Image: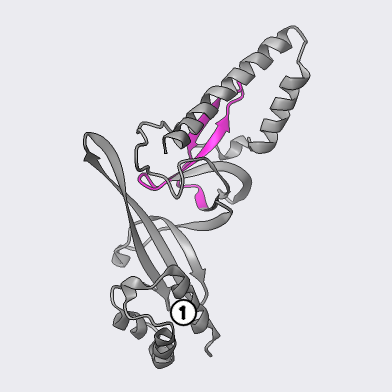
C-alpha cells in the first residue's frame, strides 16, 4: 500500500518537473527530442478535456498503512466518466469510497498535475477498470420512502431485476493511525421497488408467481443462506429469472 501511495505522489512530482524543463527549453527555442517524446507519451496516457474539471482539488490527506479509502486499489486506474451529458473516455481516475467521490487527474494549462474531485451533480455514471475487470457505477437519487442513501452504486446485473452493490468505508483510529474498514450492502430493484434482503425466504418471495421455480433453481446451486450467496451465484439466479416467461 505504501508503494501505491508513493506512486501517486511520484506522479504529482514528476509532471511539474517535466513541464518546467520544457518551459525552460522553449525560452531558448531548444526543445529536445527526449522532452518532446515524454510530452507526447504523457498526452496519450492522460486525457485533458477541461470541460470535465468542475470541482475542488483532491488532497491526499491520509497516510496509507494497511488500508485505504479507495475502490479495489490505491493506484490511479483507467476509466470512463458520463458527465453532464457527455462521455469522457480513457481517463485516469480513482474512486474514494469513504467520501463517495470520483477523482481525476487534471493537467493545468501551466503543466502541473492535480487531482480534482468531480462535481457529483454532473456525474451520471462511471466505469473503472482494475486488473482488467471493469465495474459500472451509477449515481442514484432516492425518494425519502426508499430509505437508501444517495450516491454511487455498482450495477452488478441489469435485467428484469437489477442488482445493486453499495460499497462503504468507515474509518477508525487503530494504534494512533487512521484505518479504513470495508462493508458491502446489496439491494435489488424489482417491479419498481428497492429491496434490502437479509434472508433467503424473503429473497425467494420477491419473485412472486415464479417463486417456486426460483426456489428449485436456487436449491440446485446448493445455496442455503442469503448471506452466503456470492455475486456470481446472484448473477446466475437473476439470469435464470430473466429466462422465465
Which residue appears at 35% of the width and 33% of the height? 63
Relative depth, front residue between 57 and 220: 220
Relative depth, front residue between 145 and 234: 234
- Dividing the image into 4 quarters, which one contains the N terminus? top left
Q: Does 244 sit above or below residue 129?
A: below
- Magenta region, residue range: 96-124
Relative depth, front residue between 5 and 167: 5
Residue 217 makes an appearance in the image: yes
Which residue appears at 39% of the width and 86% of the height? 219
Q: Position of residue 169 (x, y in %)?
A: 33, 49
Q: Position of residue 126 (x, y in %)?
A: 53, 52
Q: Does 223 sit above or below residue 231?
A: below
Q: How is the image coloured?
A: one colour
Q: Position of residue 181 (x, y in %)?
A: 30, 49
Residue 160 makes an appearance in the image: no
All told, the count of numbered labels is 1
Q: Which residue is mark 1?
A: 237
Categorize mark 1 by other alpha carbons within 10 Å: few (<14), some (14-19), many (20+). some
Residue 109 part of the magenta-drawn span: yes
Numbered disc 1: secondary structure = helix
Q: Does 151 sit above or below residue 177?
A: below
Relative depth, front residue between 120 and 165: 165
Horizontal placement of 93 versus 198: left or right? right
Horizontal placement of 235 versus 42: left or right? left
The image quadrant that residue 197 belongs to is bottom left
Q: Does 87 sit above or below residue 164?
A: above
The image quadrant that residue 113 belongs to is top right
Residue 55 part of the magenta-drawn span: no
Which residue appears at 28% of the width and 38% of the height? 178
Q: Position of residue 234 (x, y in %)?
A: 44, 74
Amino acid at each position: 500500500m505504501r508503494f501505491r501511495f508513493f506512486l501517486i505522489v511520484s506522479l504529482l512530482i514528476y509532471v511539474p518537473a517535466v513541464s518546467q524543463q520544457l518551459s525552460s527549453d522553449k525560452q531558448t527555442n531548444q526543445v529536445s527530442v527526449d522532452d518532446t517524446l515524454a510530452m507526447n507519451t504523457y498526452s496519450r496516457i492522460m486525457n485533458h478535456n477541461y470541460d470535465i474539471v468542475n470541482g475542488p482539488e483532491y488532497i491526499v490527506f491520509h497516510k496509507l498503512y494497511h488500508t485505504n479509502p479507495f475502490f479495489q486499489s490505491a493506484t490511479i486506474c483507467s476509466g470512463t466518466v458520463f458527465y453532464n451529458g457527455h462521455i469522457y473516455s480513457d481517463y485516469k481516475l480513482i474512486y474514494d469510497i469513504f467520501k463517495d467521490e470520483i477523482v481525476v487527474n487534471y493537467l493545468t494549462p501551466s503543466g502541473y498535475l492535480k487531482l480534482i474531485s468531480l462535481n457529483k451533480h454532473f456525474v451520471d455514471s462511471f466505469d473503472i477498470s482494475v486488473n482488467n475487470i471493469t465495474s459500472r457505477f451509477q449515481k442514484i437519487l432516492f425518494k425519502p420512502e426508499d430509505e437508501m442513501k444517495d450516491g454511487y452504486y455498482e450495477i452488478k446485473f441489469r435485467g428484469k431485476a437489477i442488482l445493486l452493490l453499495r460499497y462503504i468505508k468507515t474509518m477508525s483510529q487503530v494504534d494512533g493511525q487512521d484505518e479504513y474498514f470495508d462493508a458491502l450492502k446489496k439491494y435489488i430493484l424489482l417491479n419498481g421497488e428497492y429491496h434490502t434482503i437479509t434472508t433467503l425466504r424473503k429473497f425467494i418471495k420477491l419473485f412472486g408467481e415464479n417463486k417456486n421455480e426460483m426456489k428449485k433453481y436456487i436449491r440446485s446451486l446448493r445455496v442455503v443462506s442469503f448471506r452466503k450467496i456470492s455475486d456470481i451465484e446472484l448473477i446466475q439466479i437473476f439470469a435464470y429469472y430473466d429466462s422465465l416467461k
